[in-house]
Image (tube, rainbow, N blue to C red):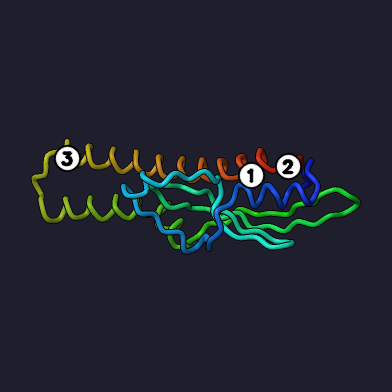
Amino acid sequence: MKSKLNITEFRAKLTENTKIGLPQLRVNFGIFSIFFFNSKCFYGNFDDSTFRLTINYNFTSAIYILKGKYQNTDNKLKLNYTVEPLSKVGIIWMKYFPFVALIGVNSFFYFNFNNTPIFVYILFNLFTIFSFLHLRWSLKRENKKLVQKFNKIFEVIE
């Protein structure tokens, strides 16, 4: 991919929009962070040819990290980046936990409470299905949001 910016403008925007730190060690303080205003869009680190960025949130931890390299070729900035999960175990947990909960709790209800009312099964299963769909949707939205924000700020063209 290419950017409309030259390399000095790109580095200036990186400096201007990035709070320096290790994206893997980003710690949020929840309600206490409401008093700290984040004016920078990204959290991460970069050097003369690479960058590792994630979205700078106040309340929640970021799920994805944007890793990439940039170089100047023929006075045009060439970018190569990928979006990866910060924790592969966390992503797997978020994707498949509703299935484990569905099987586990239904088995628990069936074997321990033989006379469990049917509305308990229906209510629990609907809640589990809703949480499954919401987690999948939020993972896709998080990934898309990171890429869109990066492409907009750094004027990336395909």
Find out whether the residues at labels 2 and 1 contact each other: C-beta distance under 8 Å.
yes
Measured as percent of width and height from the top left, residue 60 is found at: 40, 49
Please tell me which residue lies in front, 146 or 59: 59
Q: Residues within 10 Å of mark 2 (few under 14, many from 20)?
A: some
Q: Which residue is mark 2?
A: 156
Q: Position of residue 138 (x, y in %)?
A: 45, 42
Task: Tell me the SS state at disc 2.
Answer: strand
Identify residue type, mark 1.
Answer: Phe
- Residue at 50 percent across and 63 percent down: it is 24
The local secondary structure at tag 1 comes to helix
Q: Amino acid at mark 3?
A: Val
- Location of mark 3 (residue): 120
Q: Quadrant of residue 128?
A: top left
Using a 10 Å C-alpha cutoff, classify the residue at mark 1 as few (fewer than 14 neighbours), some (14 to 19) or many (20 or more).
some
The quadrant holding residue 89 is bottom left
Which residue in the structure is indicated by mark 1? 150
Going by the numbered disc 2, the residue's amino acid type is Val
Q: Quadrant of the C terminus?
A: top right
**Sooner in the amino-acid sequence: mark 3 or mark 1:** 3
